[in-house]
């Protein structure tokens, strides 16, 4: 029978922002409902983004290692082949185990998980009423509401998604065959990661980026190193190039691109459009509620993540800042802590690490050299190459470097930019160093296990204090 239930908090969206918030609120003793249209929790990240893409990245790395490098390590493997269906099955198994884990935590913490779409949110004297498509919970009353509805891929007018030949980042995770030639529109982390997956599995891959360089918001040194490495792997990268038109023919896709006013035709059989994401703020009646939405389609919030409407909060991709899962999760924790009165916590947006899971990986935190130059701040720079590292040599890895940027007068670390195997694991040292205002002297004379890739960070720091 349909029923109206009153909760302390209703979370709309069960992604890495929403589910973290729901669980933390329940731990504080709040009664919590979480609503998401998907059958499984985890949002885009667990179901269609971060986790399945990393599963395919690891599987494709493993396939390439066995195919191309095993013999060099003295491991002889005959008849190496690709079972794409099996790889996709493994990917889905990884996703299911993680989403099942979240469902278990919901039950353990007594979070009511509702599979439905929210069709309307209205303000009441006691809080909010939410209308949903769930026949059991058609109307939910909540004292407070937290919006964590995430984002979706941007679609280009000249290349609308058809799910088969013109695909989004989500659809590119489930192709049923390896494209002969995959063209990726967009040289950001999503396009490069998915391009890497299909390149390893046998596709010819061309990346088209309208800006002068790939991973445009990263430090120039990191961008250049990754681009050089990807080109060595056979990926074609065309920067300062824009897509003009797309012609879907019976047996091919013909793209018309422009570089320096020179037109070029490129033929492919699959086109991946990865030019960014847009916030999911439609269909909730936000304008009727009086919620302030900025020019970028994001919801303006205060330091407590409250919108312009009392009791209505928002986090993640729908508020300003980078569209990253770990940013949404951190906002979720701080938002709930502030709800219960722990106002001492804050989100340090200047310490959010960014990672591109190519091979080698790229990871960055803090200021870039371009930002320091633009600010006029006096700084010093140190770097060390992966090629001289003992652990890297044992792994037969040669690409990459660590670049450190520090205040010239004090030596305080200002930025860390890494291109290396498993840079995603190494960057945590940079986050901690920036958080606690460590100097390059602190880093240079800090123990780093030997042999380890992290020693490259130590060596980069030592180059900055050798003559001081």
Image (tube, rainbow, N blue to C red):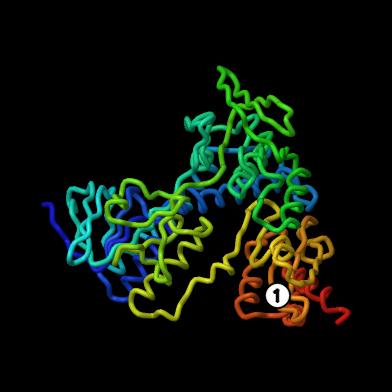
Q: Nearer the viewer, residue 96 or 261?
A: 261
**Vertical order, 166 against 466 (above or below):** above
Q: Residue reaching furthest right?
A: 467
Count the marks: 1
Q: Is residue 381 left or right of residue 245?
A: right
**Vertical order, 134 against 462 (above or below):** above
Q: Residue reaching furthest top?
A: 250
**Residue under pointer 1:** 413
Which secondary structure lies at badge 1?
strand
Q: Within 10 angstroms of label 1, few (less than 14), some, or many (20 or more) residues?
A: many
Residue 127 on image: x %, y %: 22, 65
**In terms of image quadrants, where is residue 144?**
bottom left
Task: Give the residue displayed 69% in from the left and 31% down from the top.
Answer: 258
Task: Give the residue displayed 23% in from the left and 67% down from the top.
Answer: 143
Residue 10 on image: x %, y %: 28, 62
Which quarter of the image is occupied by the C terminus?
bottom right
Q: Is residue 307 left or right of residue 453?
A: left
**Vertical order, 273 against 148 (above or below):** above
**In terms of image quadrants, where is residue 435?**
bottom right
Q: Nearer the viewer, residue 310 or 177?
A: 310
Q: Residue reaching furthest left?
A: 1
Q: Nearer the viewer, residue 387 or 155?
A: 155
Residue 157 on image: x %, y %: 51, 32
Task: Give the residue displayed 38% in from the left and 75% down from the top.
Answer: 338
Q: Is residue 114 left or right of residue 162?
A: left
Residue 346 on image: x %, y %: 47, 74
Task: Give the residue displayed 46% in from the left and 53% down from the top.
Answer: 46
């Amino acid at each position: 029978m349909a029923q109206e239930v009153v909760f302390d908090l209703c979370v709309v969206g069960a992604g890495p922002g929403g589910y973290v918030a729901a669980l933390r609120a329940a731990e504080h003793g709040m009664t919590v409902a979480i609503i998401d249209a998907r059958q499984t929790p985890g949002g885009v990240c667990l179901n269609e983004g971060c986790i399945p893409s990393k599963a395919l990245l690891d599987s494709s790395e493993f396939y390439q290692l066995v195919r191309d490098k095993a013999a060099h390590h003295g491991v002889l493997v005959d008849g190496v082949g690709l079972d794409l269906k099996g790889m996709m099955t493994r990917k889905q198994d990884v996703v299911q185990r993680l989403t099942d884990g979240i469902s278990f935590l919901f039950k353990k913490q007594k979070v009511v998980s509702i599979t439905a779409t929210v069709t309307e949110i209205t303000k009441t004297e006691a809080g909010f009423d939410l209308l949903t498509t769930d026949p059991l919970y058609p109307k939910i009353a909540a004292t407070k509401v937290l919006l964590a509805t995430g984002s979706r891929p941007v679609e280009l007018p000249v290349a609308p998604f058809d799910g088969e030949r013109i695909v989004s980042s989500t659809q590119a995770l489930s192709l049923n065959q390896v494209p002969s030639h995959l063209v990726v529109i967009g040289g950001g982390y999503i396009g490069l990661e998915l391009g890497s997956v299909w390149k390893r599995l046998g596709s010819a891959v061309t990346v088209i980026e309208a800006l002068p360089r790939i991973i445009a918001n990263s430090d120039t040194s990191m961008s250049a190193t990754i681009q050089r490495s990807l080109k060595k792997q056979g990926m074609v990268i065309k920067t300062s190039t824009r897509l003009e038109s797309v012609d879907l023919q019976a047996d091919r896709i013909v793209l018309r691109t422009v570089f320096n006013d020179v037109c070029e035709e490129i033929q492919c059989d699959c086109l991946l459009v990865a030019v960014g994401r847009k916030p999911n703020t439609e269909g909730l009646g936000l304008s009727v509620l009086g919620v302030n939405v900025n020019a970028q389609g994001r919801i303006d919030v205060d330091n407590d993540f409250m919108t312009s409407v009392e009791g209505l909060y928002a986090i993640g991709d729908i508020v300003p800042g980078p569209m990253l899962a770990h940013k949404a999760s951190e906002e979720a924790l701080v938002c709930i802590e502030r709800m219960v009165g722990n106002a001492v916590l804050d989100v340090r947006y200047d310490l959010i690490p960014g990672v591109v899971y190519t091979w080698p990986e790229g990871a960055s935190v803090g200021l870039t050299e371009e930002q320091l130059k633009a600010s006029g701040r006096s700084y010093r720079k140190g770097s060390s190459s992966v090629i001289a590292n003992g652990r890297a040599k044992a792994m037969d890895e040669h690409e990459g470097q660590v670049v450190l940027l520090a205040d010239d007068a004090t030596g305080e670390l200002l930025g860390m930019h890494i291109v290396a195997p498993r840079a995603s694991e190494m960057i945590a040292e940079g986050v901690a160093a920036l958080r606690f205002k460590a100097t390059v002297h602190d880093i240079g004379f800090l123990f780093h296990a030997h042999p380890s890739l992290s020693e490259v960070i130590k060596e980069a720091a030592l180059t900055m204090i050798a003559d001081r």
